[in-house]
Amino acid sequence: MKAVTTTDVKELKPLYKGKVRDIYQVDENTLLMIATDRISAFDVVFNEGIPEKGVVLTRVSNKWFGMIDWISNHLISTNPSEELPFLRGYPGLNERSVLVKRLKRLDVECVARGYLFGSAWKEYQKTGKVCGIELPPNMKQAEPLPEPIFTPATKAESGHDENITAEQCIEILGDEDLFNKIKTETLKIYQMAHDLLREKGIILSDTKFEFGLDEKGELYLIDEVLTPDSSRFWDASQYQVGTSPPNYDKQFIRDYLETLDWDKTPPPPPLPEEVINKTIERYKAIERIILQL
Ligand SMILES: Nc1ncnc2c1ncn2[C@@H]1O[C@H](COP(=O)(O)OP(=O)(O)OP(=O)(O)O)[C@@H](O)[C@H]1O
Ligand SMILES: [Mg+2]
C-alpha cells in the first residue's frame, strides 16, 4: 500500500499542515483533521511515509477518547464522510479523518511520565532534576519514578520542544488554576491507561496530551491521545532497567537514526524499507492491544 503523505481536499480551505496532520476548515467552529502517514523524529519530517500509520493513529485515538469519558473532548464525528459526502471521492481519507471542534489550543505539551527515559533521562543526567522536579540520586535509564510526574514542554513554532518547569508553564498559560487542572487531568489519564495496559503486558512509559478551551473556558482534550506517535509503549516481558526497552512506538526509528552519521537537522536521511515495515508492524501490534481494551 502506498503511503499518504499529502492531502488536497479541494472543497475545503486548508488551515494548517502539522508534521503529521493536515487540518482543513469546515466552518467557523469545525475542523477536518486528517492524520497522514508522515512521520517525524527529532522534529524532522521524513520524505517517506509509513503506509497506513495515519489510519492506525486515528483508530487508536478514537478508542481512547471513548474511554476517557470524564473530560470533554474535541470529537464531533469519527465518520466525517457522513457530514461531508464529497470525502468519498478521496479514497482512504475518511478512515484517517475526524471532524473536531475548533478550540483555543493551550500552547504547552502536557507530558506524564512514569519512568525515566528520553529527554527526562538526558535532563536528569545533567541536573538530577526533570522540569524542576528533584529526583532520587543514582537513578538508571528506564527506571520507574517514585510516582508519575507532570513534565510540561513548550510547543515551539520551529525547532525542538523544550522541557519547562511548573513556574514557566504557569507563566505561559497565565493561569495557575488552569495549570493545576491540566496537570491533574494529564496524570489521571496516564494512570488509567498505564494500569489498563499493564494488565496486557505493556508498560506505558510516558505520553503527551494537548488541551484546548472553548469560548466559555471549558477544558477539552484535543489532538491525538495515547498513540504510538505520542507515547512510549514497552514490552513488559522484556523490560529491563538500564536499557532502551523493546517498544511499540517511534523509538525503533530513533534508534535506527542514532546509528547514522546525521546531525538531526533537515534534510532527513532516507528511511530504508525494512525500518518502515518494522515500524508499521509495531504500530499495528499496539493498536490490536489498545482496540481490545
Ligand atoms: N480541536 C483542535 N482545535 C485546534 N487545534 C487543534 C485541535 N486538535 C489538534 N489541534 C492542533 O492541530 C495540529 C495537529 O497537527 P500535528 O499533530 O501534525 O502537529 P505537530 O506537528 O504535532 O505540530 P504542532 O502541534 O507543534 O503544531 C497541532 O498543532 C494541534 O495542536
Ligand atoms: Mg502533533
Image: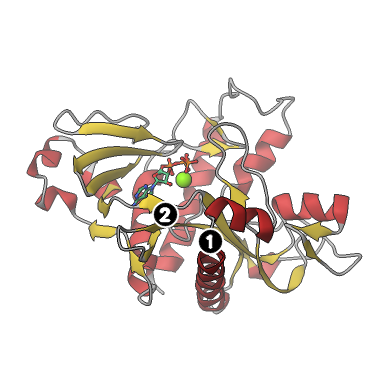
Instruction: Tell me the residue at 58%/73% (across/down).
Output: 201
Q: Which residue is mark 1?
A: 175
User: How far apart are labels 1 and 2 at the CA level?
Assistant: 24 Å
Q: Is residue 262 above or below residue 154?
A: above
The quarter of the image holding the C terminus is bottom left
Instruction: Give, as a three-letter code, the residue at label 2.
Output: Glu
User: Which of 241 and 209 lies nearest the eye of the viewer?
Assistant: 209
Depth check, front residue: 47 or 153: 153
Which is more toward the observer, 175 or 289? 175
Element under label 1?
A: loop
Residue reaching furthest to the right: 138
**Three-letter amino acid code of the residue under disc 1:** Asp
Most extreme residue toward the top, as rendered?
267
- Which percent across, then down, holds residue 142? 75, 62
Residue 49 is at least partly visible in this image: yes
Q: Position of residue 57 (x, y in %)?
A: 40, 52
- Where does the image place residue 117, in percent across and percent down from the top left? 72, 57
Residue found 34% across the figure and 48% down from its top: 55
Residue at (62% x, 45% y) in the render: 252
- Pick the front one: 215 or 102: 215
Of tags 1 and 2, the one toward the viewer is 1
Mark 2 Cβ and ligand 2 under 8 Å apart = yes
Residue visible at 23% across and 39% down in the picture: 25
Q: Earlier in the sequence, mark 1 or mark 2?
A: 1
Which corner quadrant holds the N terminus?
top left
Q: Residues within 10 Å of mark 1 (few under 14, many from 20)?
A: few
Q: Position of residue 241 (x, y in %)?
A: 79, 65
Is 160 on the left or on the right of 200, as rendered? right
- Is disc 2 placed on a helix, strand or loop? loop
| Residue underneath mark 2 | 224
Q: Above or below — where is 233 with respect to 71?
A: above
Furthest-front residue in this view: 174
